[in-house]
Structures are given as structure tokens and as C-alpha cells.
Image (cartoon, rainbow, N blue to C red):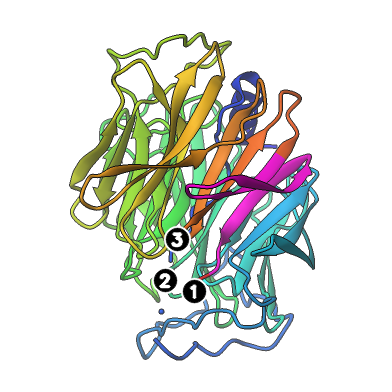
Amino acid sequence: MSRRSIVLLAATVLILSVLACNPPTAQPPDTITPFSPATAEPTAPPGGEPTSEAPTEPPTEPPPSSWLPAGTFALYAAGPWDGRQVYALAPGPASTDLGRTVPFNTALSRTGHWIAHASGPSPATGVVVANLEDGTTYNIPLTTDYTLYGLAFDHTETRLAFMELGGSGVGTYTWAVVVVNLADGSTARFEDTFGLPVGAGVMLSGWPIGWTAAGDELLLDTFMPDTEGNWAGVWAVALPPGTPSAALNTLSRRTVIAAGDYSAETRLSPDATHLLYLNRDPSYTPAGYAPMAYDLAVNQLWQVNVASGASTQLIDVADGGALARTAAWSQELPHALFAQGNYAGDTFASLILKVRDDTGTIHDAGSVPLPPGGSLQSVDWCLPDFALVVVTTADYAHQLHIIEFGGGSTLVTSDAYISVLGCIP
């Protein structure tokens, strides 16, 4: 397992806080770009020359998935860390095993047509990219001795991006972004190198968290390898469709969220225009907060327009409470879902789900079924009046619940590890 993954998992175990590894989801008109036959292999390895051509027509958006069980509104994975089963979730709740096993590093496309994951337990040797509807599968090899980080499909489901991190030299790191063309499995590779100490204006290694709505820029969440230096800035790198392999530092790029302005995973809006992010006023400490190791408390929720870079503060808790380290967008409206509560040592005593609508009004949505000594791992808002929450118990087992706004909660399943892969429109 890579250093960044170890850091994230360690933080989870030590203080039962969320540092989820899965990429965010983004969220149509009428036709779908044709896909190549099943089990096609890529025509060039990530380190080779690109074979894809720029599309002759703008990509069209895929329709919602009709092949999934009726009423499916989300996919989730449950089981051991490196061998979880993928399930379709429908109201009831009803779970259907889709017959696919995935490791911890997994991403789902916006409509659920495509899934991508490491080829096996870490250190994986490749990336499996599969169309869950028609069976098209690409096996993309990772560059030898490189580690996989982050997977993100673009809004129109025509491309996938992932990051490779090479072994460190004497104060030098080599990393790359690989872009997969989902029409034929061909790849383009964009490599960069930086040395220590890092100079001004240098972009650290970054894993993909999504693409802008137009698909012209890839969003990267940067970090310092081999340290606990996560949340080192979100950058947008110019990568329009058809961009051939090149040195990453030759591409246009800009900062979307500066290092120090956020301290948890960001969340891309369904229309791929805004990011939600959490941070903490450095002068504020929540009442009753006594972290065991990592200080990960947050009390502010922000959004940033990824095109303009303009940020807006949505929530500022200053009454002794704090926010859980996860938030979600509504699938249909520019509303944000978050959890607020009070600490009792290194975990929350209780958490209430709240909704902030686009007028700034805050509504209580329901209580998080938080086990004693447990923590909230993730929230997802797939249906207007329901939320999905993953919580851990005191002994680190995971539970997936459906919370009805203004009502109660229903346990969907319990397992060693559970992650919501994405909402299905």
C-alpha cells in the first residue's frame, strides 16, 4: 500500500475520522458514444506513444443506465479492504450483487456505465476499466514500480484519468497522469518530476478528483509523497479531448484551492462546476475536542467555482460544535448536505445531518446512527429525501444506513469495509 493510502487509513483507525480514498462523483441528452468490442486491450501502454486521435465530433452525454435492477439509485462495495463485492442499491432497501470484486481504489462513472479499479491488491500492476452494461473491458498496465493513485471519469464518460507515482530518488519524485480513451482503450501519459525542497510555483504530485464540465481541465488534489502532507492544493490542468502525451509541466495549469485552505477530501458537484471543501478556522477549537493523534477537526464548509476560482463560505460553526469531515451535493439542486455535532474526546458524541439550500437556509435532515465510539465515514445524497451514510463501530466495522429526511434510518448492511461508489441518476 502506498504512503498516502497508509496515512489516510492510519488517520481513520486512530481517530475514526473520514479520509476516504474514492474519487468523487459528478452528475443528461440522448445518444451514447459507441464503445469498442468487449475485452479489447489498449493499443499503447501508459509509457508509450499515444495512439488516440482527437474526436471529430464533440462527445455526447450517455443516457441513464437501464440495465441495472429497477429503482437502482447507487452502487456500493462491501467486504475486505482488497476484495469487496459491488452491489446495486434500490429502495426497500434491496441490494443486488453485481458479481464483481474490487479492491480499495475504485471509481464509478457518473451514470454507472463504467467502473475502474486497481487490478488487484496494492501494489497493483494495472488498472481494469469495464463497461458494466456491455462488457467492454480494458486492462491498462501501470508503469513498472509505479503506484496507482486516484481514478476519475470525465462528465461525458469518454475518458478516465489516473495517477502513477514513481519511487523516490535522492530528493526527487517522478509522477504521471494517464488518460484512457474509453472508445478504444488507448492512452496518453503526462509525466512530471519535482525535487526537494519544492520551489515556488511547483505543482506537487496530484491524484485526479474529476474534470470540469466542459472536459477541458482535469482537477488534481496534490500532496507531498512519503509524508503526511496531504491537502497541498487543488489544481486544474488543461487536458482537452485528444491531447497527446507530453511533459505535464508544459501544459497550462492553475490553482483552484490553495494549500492551507482545505483539510479534507473535496466533492465535485453533479454538474462538475463546483467543489465542496471543508476547513477550520485556525483560531477555533471545538468544545470537548481531544484528538488522540491527528488533529483533524473542521468547522467551515466552502464551495468554489472551478471555472473562476471564486470561493464562498457556506457554513461557519462557532458555538463549540464542529463538522464531520464529509459533505455531499444534491443530485438535482445546488444544495449541500453535511453533518454537525459536538465532540466527546476524539469522536463525536452525536451528529445531525443538515441541508443548506441555495438561499442559505439550513434545515435539519435527521440524526446519524452513530455507534458509541464510532465515526461518520461518508455521506451521499442520491435521492431528494434520502441520504446514504457509512459509519464505523468502535471496533472499526462499517455500516451502511439509509436516512429518511425527517424520519428514521434503516441499516442496509454491515461489513469489514463499505464504500458508496456513486449515485445513479
- Which residue is labeled 2 in the image? 244
Q: Position of residue 231 (x, y in %)?
A: 41, 33
Q: Residue at x 25, y 44 (%)?
A: 361
In the image, taking residue 239 as reference, residue 161 lies left or right, namely right
- Which residue is labeled 1 in the image? 157
Q: Earlier in the sequence, mark 1 or mark 2?
A: 1
In the image, taking residue 80 as reference, residue 345 lies left or right, namely left
- Badge 3 marks a residue whose secondary structure is loop
Is there CB contact under 8 Å for labels 1 and 3?
Answer: no
Distance between mark 2 and mark 3 Cα atoms: 41 Å
- Amino acid type, callout 3: Pro
Specify the segment rendered in magenta.
399-424
- Badge 2 marks a residue whose secondary structure is loop
Magenta: main secondary structure equals strand
Q: Quadrant of the N terminus?
A: top right
Residue 42 has which mark? Answer: none
Q: Residue at x 33, y 62 (%)?
A: 333
- Amino acid type, callout 1: Glu
Visible in this render: residue 371?
yes
- Which residue is labeled 3 in the image? 384
Looking at the image, the residue that sits furthest to the front is 407
Distance between mark 1 and mark 2 Cα atoms: 19 Å
Q: Position of residue 59 (x, y in %)?
A: 40, 83
Q: Position of residue 364 (x, y in %)?
A: 40, 40
Is there CB contact under 8 Å for labels 1 and 2?
Answer: no
Q: Earlier in the sequence, mark 2 or mark 3?
A: 2
Q: Badge 3 local density, few (<14 within 10 Å), some, or many (20+)?
A: few
Visible in this render: residue 105?
no
In the image, taking residue 70 as reference, residue 386 lies left or right, namely left
Q: Residue at x 33, y 56 (%)?
A: 237
